[in-house]
């Protein structure tokens, strides 16, 4: 369970925000290791994907979250938040490991 994790389990992770700061239907943009990452909520789970859409290398920070996917605002390609897979012929978006400890969101770059 995530609340049993301690600091030693978080080696290599960066704290990016609190769980409460992650909105319901839009991603929250954070920086991880100098890179734009989108922290996304799907139900009770939190995911992190790269900000840049692999279709045309544009930002998805204004993307919409729907049923476990992020929908790119530019051409509406959909990327699975868990696997990064796209519903079109497109490379997957990079996903990042997330841990939640004491209401804080940690992401491993
Ligand atoms: S740039 Fe994201 S779908 Fe085209």
Image (cartoon, rainbow, N blue to C red):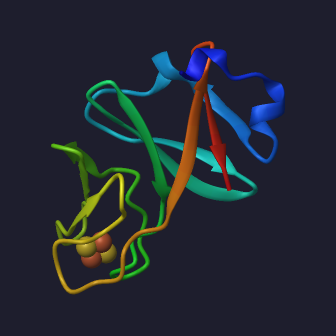
Given the current orientation, which residue lies at the most extreme bottom position?
89
Residue ID at (29%, 52%): 63
Left or right of 95? Residue 97 is right
The residue lying toward the viewer, choosing from 49 and 102, is 102
Residue ID at (58%, 34%): 99
Evaluate whether residue 1 shows in this view: yes
Q: Position of residue 25 (x, y in %)?
A: 25, 34
Q: Is residue 79 above or below residue 107?
A: below
The quadrant holding residue 17 is top right
Evaluate whether residue 104 shows in this view: no
The residue lying toward the viewer, choosing from 54 and 68, is 68
Q: Position of residue 51 (x, y in %)?
A: 48, 60
Q: Is residue 24 above or below residue 31?
A: above
Left or right of 44? Residue 46 is right
Residue ID at (48%, 67%): 94
The residue lying toward the viewer, choosing from 94 and 74, is 94
Q: Is residue 9 above or below residue 36?
A: above
User: Which image quarter is the C terminus in?
Assistant: bottom right
The quadrant holding residue 93 is bottom left
- Quarter holding ligand 1: bottom left
How many numbered markers are drawn?
0
Left or right of 27? Residue 80 is left
Residue ID at (17%, 66%): 76
Q: Position of residue 19 (x, y in %)?
A: 50, 21
Q: Position of residue 1 (x, y in %)?
A: 53, 21
Left or right of 23? Residue 6 is right
């Amino acid at each position: 369970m995530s609340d049993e994790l301690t600091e030693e389990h978080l080696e290599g992770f960066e704290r990016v925000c609190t769980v409460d700061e992650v909105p319901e239907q839009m991603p929250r943009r954070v920086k991880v290791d100098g890179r734009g990452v989108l922290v996304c909520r799907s139900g009770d789970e939190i995911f992190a994907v790269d900000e840049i859409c692999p279709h045309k290398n544009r930002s998805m920070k204004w993307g919409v979250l729907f049923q476990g996917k992020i929908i790119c605002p530019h051409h509406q390609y959909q990327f699975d938040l868990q696997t990064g897979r796209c519903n079109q012929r497109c490379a997957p978006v990079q996903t990042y490991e997330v841990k939640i400890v004491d209401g804080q969101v940690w992401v491993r770059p």
